[in-house]
Image (cartoon, rainbow, N blue to C red):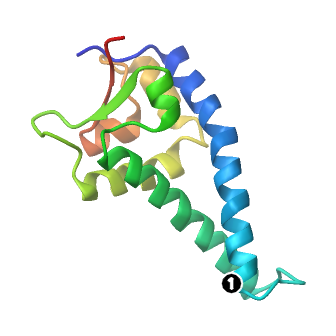
Amino acid sequence: MRAPGLLRRLAAMTYEAPLLAGVLVVASAVFMTAAGGAPSLEGWRRHALQAFFVAVLAAYFLWCWLRGGQTLPMKAWHIRLVMPGRASVPPGGALLRFVLAALLVPTGISLLWALCDREKQFLHDRIVGTRLVSVPR
């Protein structure tokens, strides 16, 4: 299967951003409620909230990728995450992809890699062995 174009993948990422913002707003409400309201998010409370956000985002992406290989924006843009030779992406592969993408995408390294990669895959996908493919419409 063919890799989706870089513009299509960037469009899906752009669509993902407000969706993730909404997920994090709900997560912060859950955190504040569980913490009994946090008048001050300093010190350990701030670090706990940040760790909670990372865990929530990991849960979101892993749940989507392990249940069909697509987040809602990936479905809208007809993109699927696959691991060649497997029926689905294994949990360890999905987790490693999440961690590497969280580290590499904000730096732009993964995007630059995709411009030079012979199959137009992101660096984090190349490392993990996953691929983004176009889904027939």
Amino acid beneath label 1: Ala
Is residue 92 found left or right of 28 in the rendered image? left
> How crowded is the residue under tag 1: few (<14 C-alpha within 10 Å), some, or many (20+)?
few
Residue 80 position, x and y percent, is 34, 29
Q: Can you name the residue that lies furthest to the right here? A: 39
Q: In this view, does 126 lie above or below 53?
A: above
Q: What element carries label 1?
A: helix
Q: In the rendering, at what x and y percent does residue 64 appear?
A: 40, 46
Count how many numbered circles sit on residues in the image: 1
* Image height of 46 relative to 112, above or below: below
At a point 16% along the width and 33% down the height, the residue shown is 84
| Residue found 69% across the figure and 61% down from its top | 26
The x and y percentages for residue 54 are 56, 64
Residue 19, image quadrant: top right
Query: In this figure, which residue is indicated by the disc labeled 1?
Result: 34
The answer to whether 8 is drawn above or below residue 71 in the figure is: above
